[in-house]
Image (tube, rainbow, N blue to C red):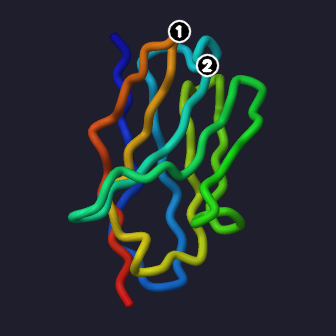
Amino acid sequence: QVQLVESGGGLVQFGGSLRLSCAASRSILSSTAMGWYRQAPGKEREFLATIGSSSSANYADSVKGRFTISRDNDKDTVYLQMNSLKPEDTAVYYCYGNWWGYVYWGQGTQVTVSS
């Protein structure tokens, strides 16, 4: 069993920035991929970004150029740097990790962007 704990969410104004962290209880070096999703009220969970073991990254079009995913293997932590935030970015943000085909999720962290 792997535990993922997100942190860094909060309330931010339009155009502001936040950095989310996702700390894993297992070495992320052995993971296939780590990434982030979000879910806004009344909407389906939306893919945001993923990063592989080689640090190659992919992004959803909705966040490309504004969000950056990164990883610190020594700290077993994945980050999501979010810039130029908009009210439509308001959602619960979830971290996930894939270890040998098993996908684990964090509990989520709320991000609220005020206009």
Q: Residue at x 44, y 47 (%)?
A: 37
Q: Is residue 91 above or below residue 109?
A: below
Quarter of the rendering containing residue 24: top left
Q: Nearer the viewer, residue 74 or 112?
A: 112
Q: Could you tell me residue 86's position as x and y percent?
A: 48, 80
Dot 1 corresponds to which residue?
Answer: 100
Q: Residue at x 34, y 34 (%)?
A: 106
Q: Secondary structure at mark 1?
A: loop
Residue 97 as seen in the image, left or right of residue 11: right
- Tell me the crowding category of disc 2: few under 14, some 14 to 19, or many 20 or more residues within 10 angstroms, Cα based: some
Dot 2 corresponds to which residue?
Answer: 32
Residue 15 as seen in the image, left or right of residue 96: right
The three-letter code of the residue at mark 2 reads Thr
Q: Residue at x 49, y 13 (%)?
A: 101
Q: Could you tell me residue 104's position as x and y percent?
A: 38, 24
The three-letter code of the residue at mark 1 reads Trp
Q: Secondary structure at mark 2?
A: loop
* Quadrant placement of the N terminus: top left
Q: Is residue 23 above or below residue 10?
A: above
The outermost residue toward the bottom is 115
